[in-house]
Each structure stands twice: as structure tokens, then as C-alpha cells.
């Protein structure tokens, strides 16, 4: 099979690889559509370390090619998705209700992101086939009425963006600021609307992304090239600040800006993947006495999460189809990465088809 392989920082190449073998609990899925995530760009740049030779990618939509010997409840030929996070369903973390960290705790200490295996610790899905581990905990059939592109965001960015809104404990009538309107930030904006926020403020520097933010529920959009977003948010809120600030970029600057616009007792919900240390400014942090909550989220996974997200789409509550702005064949993976990593031509998400 053809597969996109991490070679070294700055190089992801298309290579020929054997079709994966599967164990008794696994499934072999033939990929029909996948995509590139911002985390894959961190891998490409060497900002997130993975082993050389790893097949990258963690957002699979496909068809079951083969089932492990003990897998029940599925059929070969069935259309399915699996989340970027593939919990076992029987680890301590899973049984404690934290599927994203499944397998994170070991005798040698805690390793965060234990549930993220595809394209991280095992071969991923920017390939013609992928082995999905613990298939009965992770595969969810795709409703016949939904296309690949309609469900393409469910495995990662929709689940992650919604998690930012859920972890932020958004309530009906809340005011919410979402810093960065890339794919995950846009899904956080949509999640804030579905959670009942009455005022949603989207921050970004690209006009196409700000326009999409309005389409997905933002009442106000701020171009940080034109105005200081902290000052503008405090102006919009009459100095009160926001109930929830969602950080969806992964930089110290946006993290600090979220804290500066947060009201006393508000929640900073962090979704970014950070590659440098964060700083808590003394004033906005109120010297630790502001009753703030800072919470981080990793993409929730598992088949029940996927079922719920696809149900939202099937019910017509959300349409993320317009977020697929570009389409590539797997053969053109290098061009797809170059476009996506450099955010050219108004790209939001790319659809990759073998």
C-alpha cells in the first residue's frame, strides 16, 4: 500500500508499505477519505516528536476490509469512522471516564496523551489501509445518508473543538471568546453556540476564517491585525470580560490573551498544542486569587463519542462541509502538506483520498 511516512523534521514522504497485519481485537480499514491535522504539521516541523518511519495521520473514514477473530457487532464492507483517540475501553483511565488518556499511566510515571495512538505511537491513516486497535471500542458505522466529507471532521477537530466548549462549562447566556479560528477553533465556536452561549467572539487574522466563524455562530469577529483583541473584547463586554475563553492555537501569546479577557471566576479552556513554556501574568491571574479555572482537553475518542457527533450532523444541527476547502489524492501528499502548513489559498481543511 501507499502511505505517508515521517522521515525526519521537514520531510513526510509517500512510501510503499505492507498492508498491516491485525490481531484478534483489531480491524483493518480501507481508507476512503482522510485529512491533515494541525498536529501533523507539528510532527512535520519536528515540534512534536515521533519515531522516524511512522505512518502519520489520525482522522480515518473508510470501509472495514477485515475483522479480527474475536470482533463482534461489525461486518466487512461496512462504512465506519474511528476517532483520533482509540481507547481500549478497559484501562484505568477509560474506566475512570477519561478515554483520551487511556494507557497514559504506567509503573514508570504518567505520559499524557496515552489514548492518541494512530499516527503517534502506531501507524496512522494517511495511507490506503490502517489497523484500528480495539475495534469494538472504536469503530462506529457511518449513517448511509452522510457522505465521507460530512463526517470527516468527527474523528478529531469536531470532537476536540466541542471538548473545549464542554470543558469550559458554557451555560445558556454566556459570553465566550475563541482565540484562533482555524479548524479546531471554528469547531469550538460551533460548540459554544450549541451549548447556549449568547455572545460569541471569534479572533483571527485571516478574513476567510473570520467569515467562516460568523457562519458557524460568532456574533462578533476580531481581526488581530486591525485592533488589539484584548482591548476590543473588554470593550464589547463593557469591561466585564468573558465567562469562558477558549485558546485554540497553542501559543503563549494567545494563552495569556485568554487570561486577560477572563472575568473573575471564569474558565480558560485550553485546546492548543504548546511548543514552549506558558506564563501566568500576575495581574490577570489575580495573584492566584481570582477563582479562575484553567482546564485542558485532549480530543475525546471512542465509538460513543463518534456516534454522538455524527448524530449532531445527521440532525442538521451543524454543517462542516464548507470547511473542506481543498482536495488531494494521496499521491500528492507533499503538495497537500505544503499548502496546509503555510495556510495558503484560504485553506481550512483538505480531503485526502487514496
Image (spheres, grey):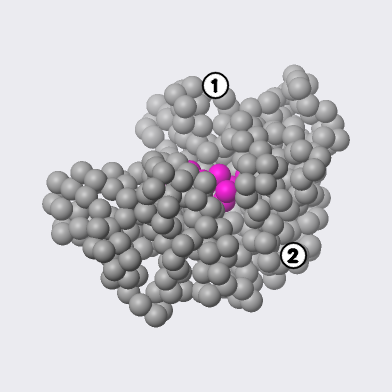
The crowding category of the residue bearing disc 1, from other C-alpha atoms within 10 Å (few below 14, some 14 to 19, many at least 20), is some
- For mark 1, what is the residue? 90
Q: Main secondary structure of the magenta part?
A: helix
Question: Could you say which quadrant of the image residue 137 lies in?
Answer: top right
**Residue 289 % position (x, y):** 14, 46
Q: In the rendering, which numbered label is found on residue 345?
A: none
Q: Who is closer to the viewer here, 236 or 169?
A: 236
Task: Please name which of the two marks, 2 or 1, marks the residue nearer to the observer.
Answer: 2
Magenta residue span: 155-164
**Residue 166 % position (x, y):** 45, 41
- Extreme-bottom residue of the structure: 226
- For mark 2, what is the residue? 327
Q: Is residue 158 magenta?
A: yes
Question: Which residue sits at x=44%, y=66%?
Answer: 220
In the image, residue 263 sits, relative to residue 85, either above or below, namely below
Q: Who is closer to the viewer here, 264 or 13?
A: 264
Question: Could you say which quadrant of the image residue 314 lies in?
Answer: top right
Question: Which residue sits at x=61%, y=65%?
Answer: 348
Q: Is residue 313 left or right of residue 191?
A: right
Question: Which residue sits at x=16%, y=58%?
Answer: 282
**Residue 142 % position (x, y):** 75, 39
Question: Could you say which quadrant of the image residue 260 lies in?
Answer: bottom left
Dot 2 or dot 1: first in sequence order is 1
Question: Which residue sits at x=18%, y=48%?
Answer: 290
**Residue 266 % position (x, y):** 28, 48
In the image, residue 354 sits, relative to residue 75, either above or below, namely below
Q: Is residue 10 left or right of residue 110?
A: right
In the image, residue 42 sits, relative to residue 318, either above or below, namely below
Amino acid at each position: 500500500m501507499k502511505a505517508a511516512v515521517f522521515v525526519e523534521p521537514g520531510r513526510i514522504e509517500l512510501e510503499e508499505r505492507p498492508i498491516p497485519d491485525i490481531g484478534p481485537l483489531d480491524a483493518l480499514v480501507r481508507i476512503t477519505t482522510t485529512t491533515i491535522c494541525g498536529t501533523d504539521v507539528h510532527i512535520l516541523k519536528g515540534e512534536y516528536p515521533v519515531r522516524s518511519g511512522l505512518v502519520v495521520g489520525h482522522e480515518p473514514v473508510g470501509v472495514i476490509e477485515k475483522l479480527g477473530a474475536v470482533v463482534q457487532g461489525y461486518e466487512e464492507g461496512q462504512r465506519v469512522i474511528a476517532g483520533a483517540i482509540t481507547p481500549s475501553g478497559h484501562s484505568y483511565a477509560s474506566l475512570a471516564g477519561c478515554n483520551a488518556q487511556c494507557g497514559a499511566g504506567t509503573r514508570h510515571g504518567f505520559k499524557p496523551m496515552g489514548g492518541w495512538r494512530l499516527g503517534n505511537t502506531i501507524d496512522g491513516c494517511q495511507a490506503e489501509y490502517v489497523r484500528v486497535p480495539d475495534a469494538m471500542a472504536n469503530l462506529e458505522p457511518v449513517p448511509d445518508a452522510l457522505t465521507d466529507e460530512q463526517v470527516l471532521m468527527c474523528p478529531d477537530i469536531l470532537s476536540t473543538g466541542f471538548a473545549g466548549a464542554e470543558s469550559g462549562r458554557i451555560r445558556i447566556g454566556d459570553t465566550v471568546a475563541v482565540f484562533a479560528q482555524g479548524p479546531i477553533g471554528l469547531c469550538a465556536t460551533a460548540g459554544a453556540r450549541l451549548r447556549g452561549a449568547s455572545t460569541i467572539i471569534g479572533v483571527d487574522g485571516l478574513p476567510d476564517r473570520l467569515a467562516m466563524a460568523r457562519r458557524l455562530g460568532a456574533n462578533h469577529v476580531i481581526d488581530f491585525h486591525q485592533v488589539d483583541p484584548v482591548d476590543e473584547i473588554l470593550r464589547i463586554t463593557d469591561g466585564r470580560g468573558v465567562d469562558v475563553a477558549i485558546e485554540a492555537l497553542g501559543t503563549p501569546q494567545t494563552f495569556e490573551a485568554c487570561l486577560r479577557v477572563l472575568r473573575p471566576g471564569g474558565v480558560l479552556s485550553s485546546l492548543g498544542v504548546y511548543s514552549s513554556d506558558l506564563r501566568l501574568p500576575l495581574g490577570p491571574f489575580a495573584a492566584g486569587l481570582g477563582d479562575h479555572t484553567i482546564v485542558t482537553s485532549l480530543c475525546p475518542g471512542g465509538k460513543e463519542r463518534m456516534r454522538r457527533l455524527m448524530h449532531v450532523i445527521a440532525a442538521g444541527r451543524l454543517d462542516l462541509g464548507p470547511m473542506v476547502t481543498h482536495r488531494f489524492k494521496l499521491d500528492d501528499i507533499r503538495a497537500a502538506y505544503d499548502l496546509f502548513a503555510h495556510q495558503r489559498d484560504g485553506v481550512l481543511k483538505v480531503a485526502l483520498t487514496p
